[in-house]
Amino acid sequence: MAQVTLENLTKKFKSVTAVKNLSIDIRDQEFFVLLGPTGAGKTTTLRCIAGLEKPNGGTINIAGQNVNDWGPAERDVAIVFQYYSLYPHYTVKQNLAFPLKSKIRKISPEEMNQRIAKVSKTLQINHLLDRKTDKLSGGEMQRVAIGRAIVREPRIFLMDEPLSNLDAKLREVLRSELKDLQMNLGATFLYVTHDQVEAMTMGERIGILNKGRLIQVGTPYDIYNSPANTYVAEFVGTPAINLFDGLIQDSRLVVIKNDFEFELDQKTINRLNGVSGEVKIGIRSEDIEIAVDKGTEGRIYLVEDMGMGKIVTIKINDHLLRATVDAKYHFEIDTNVRFQLNPEKLHFFNKDSGENLIAG
Amino acid sequence: MAEINLVEIEKYFGKNYVIRKLNLDIKDGEFLVLLGPSGCGKTTTLRAIAGLEEIDSGDILIDGQPVQNLKASDRNIAFVFQLYALYPHLNAYDNIAFPLKATKRSKETISLRVEEVAKVLRIESILDKNPSELSSGDMQRVAVGRAMVRRPKAILMDEPIGSLDAKLREEMRTELKRLHIEINSTTLYVTHDQVEAMSMADKVAIMEDGVLQQVGTPAEVYDQPANLFVAQFVGSPIMNILDCKIDTDENCTQCFLGQDTPALPLAKSLYDKIESQGVPFGQLALGVRPEAVRLAREARDDYIKAQVHVIEPLGPFDIVDIKVENQIIRAKAASRFVEKPGEGIWLQLDEQRTHFFDKDTGQSLKI
């Protein structure tokens, strides 16, 4: 079993608290993603779990055992870094063999060859075994770096933004491969990234960090459909969620400055459960319906043809709303258009704290 | 503004043949995006137009005049490096006036030019503000204003928003594109990010290894990619490229994605069209974008059975990785349409959006 439990983990660097009271339960064989912008504390968290940093407070449990005092080698975790330093003048085979030559783990040469053969087959790098690593492409190097972690057959894989140096196309290909690999290995993966697409497509659950604190943990669907606050709502999803100030009157009417207003349907009123007054309203671009017969009128400010769909930016006085529509529709800029917001998909946040006002 | 023509441009760095007989036209007022991976030659091309690199042969024409032998400062082209690089200690007015102050023009002339540019960019009301007080959209307009104030013939931009966070990049794209619609400047924008290219370009020119692969509107390069490179570079999620075998019977063209998999029936006329292209059938690759793959949870006529391998939730929809024998097809599906890996699924392709490529040359069979 390879669960990882963090309880109130805290790590300070001089006056900066990089990680604050972080508590997470990562399940055995889970692909867990830690998501957040640069400086959120994700790499620090990873390094604490690996044993490369000593926490200032809290406990780290691996498979039920407190490992706070254990060194990195004893914890039996493998790390894949963003800048995967392979030994450039050694071959791929030699690079893969290196971790197996450690004095702590006694492995016979037969066992070593077996493991290397298995790993290179899984990662499709067996044709590269005799090549020096400085002659490899980015994607090939990445596979060798991952292979170097897999040969050790650790309980837990820690990955720190391993794809961020690769181009978009390769990142997409390797994402599916990594997910497939994790399923086949049956290993626990803790994957750290700032890229919300990576988090959404690979994570069974995602933990979102902001300035060292854990904001929300949930499946991709939970995080996307029920964000805990505006920070999470804005972090996940492209285009970014539309957020604007609004006023709920008598728990049924939404007024946006003097620009537009709409009545809420009964289902949404029930969801609101009596919330009234000034709020922050969120609506995702795919939940705005345009070119309808009724609804609010706005002016088409911009149309971006993204291929799979179009992003239409609508201007209502000072407000700009982004809506995504199917590519087959055509819109002229600087013309008027009517639109409606799907009431079931409206999010309501506290206007000061940004907390989601609707539970669950 | 001006038209720019690149005629048979060649550039070597030592032995590296970096720009290989490039021909490209940028029309007056057009926003052309030069798109390609790192090292494809796009930045070198931009710098050659600006006069920061010399070319080895060919002509660079601005409004019909060859400029390749002119110094950068004599070409009257503005280079915008990063949209945030405003002088923080100067207000918007002084930022825009800066390039003119160096030319020793009179105060009145400078004032007139700045006001003129501010009017076009609709930033008259913020001229007295410092960059720290400006929104990102306004900062961008000031940066462009600084480029425009010398009345350049064209504006060149080299990956100006790549280092910004995702949300800011989105906002900048909107503002840049809107700005271009308003001022209609001849613009050459270089990037490796196909999202930026699709969003902002009037025309996209895709480059690889110093060679132009295709030039067209965003819709054209997306819907009718000229070759495998363009097909897989433009559009996210990526187009599926699959091995297939084509055969025919009385009713239809049969498309086999695997030896033991039933055929996907396609229009009968397709077989003849493919055959007439003269590409050996063993060399065919099928290209289909995830949104052109139709899915069903139960058996349906003309659909083939397959298995769900991996589900990739994107938020507004899922990408479902489906195993058909040894191949994986990625299909767009409604969020949670498919519940878990291992489930059976039935699929079919939208024929109108199915492409065929010659695997050897990479070229699209224009069908």
Image (tube, coloured by chain):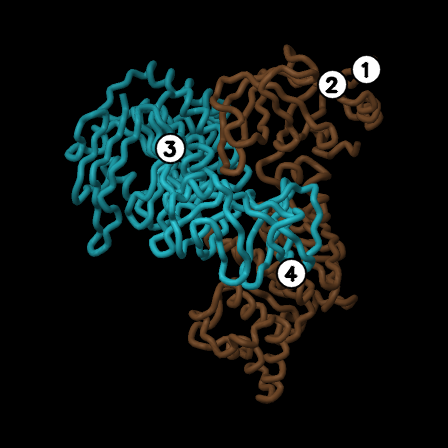
Question: Quick one: label 4 or label 1, which is nearer the N terminus?
Answer: 4
Question: Which numbered circle lies on residue B251?
Answer: 1
Q: Is residue A140 left or right of residue B289?
A: left
**Nearer mark to the viewer, of 4 and 2:** 2
Question: Which numbered circle lies on residue B363?
Answer: none
Pinpoint residue B268: horizontal percent, then vertical percent: 81, 20
Question: Which numbered circle lies on residue B265?
Answer: 2
Few, some or many residues within 10 Å of mark 2 (<14, 14–19, 20+): many
- Judge if badges 1 and 3 mark residues of a common chain: no
Q: Mark 4 and mark 1: span between their CA atoms?
A: 56 Å
**Which chain hosts label 3?**
A
Q: Specify the amino acid type for callout 3.
A: Arg
State which chain is coloured brown: B
Q: Specify the amino acid type for callout 1.
A: Asn
Of the pair A139 and B82, the residue shown nearer to us: B82
Question: Which numbered circle lies on residue A205?
Answer: 3
Q: What element carries label 1?
A: loop
- Judge if badges 4 and 1 mark residues of a common chain: yes
**Nearer mark to the viewer, of 3 and 4:** 3
Question: Quick one: label 1 or label 2, which is nearer the N terminus?
Answer: 1
Do the numbered discs 1 and 3 sit on residues whose CB atoms are within 8 Å? no
Q: Name the residue under label 4.
A: B48
Q: Mark 3 and mark 4: span between their CA atoms?
A: 48 Å
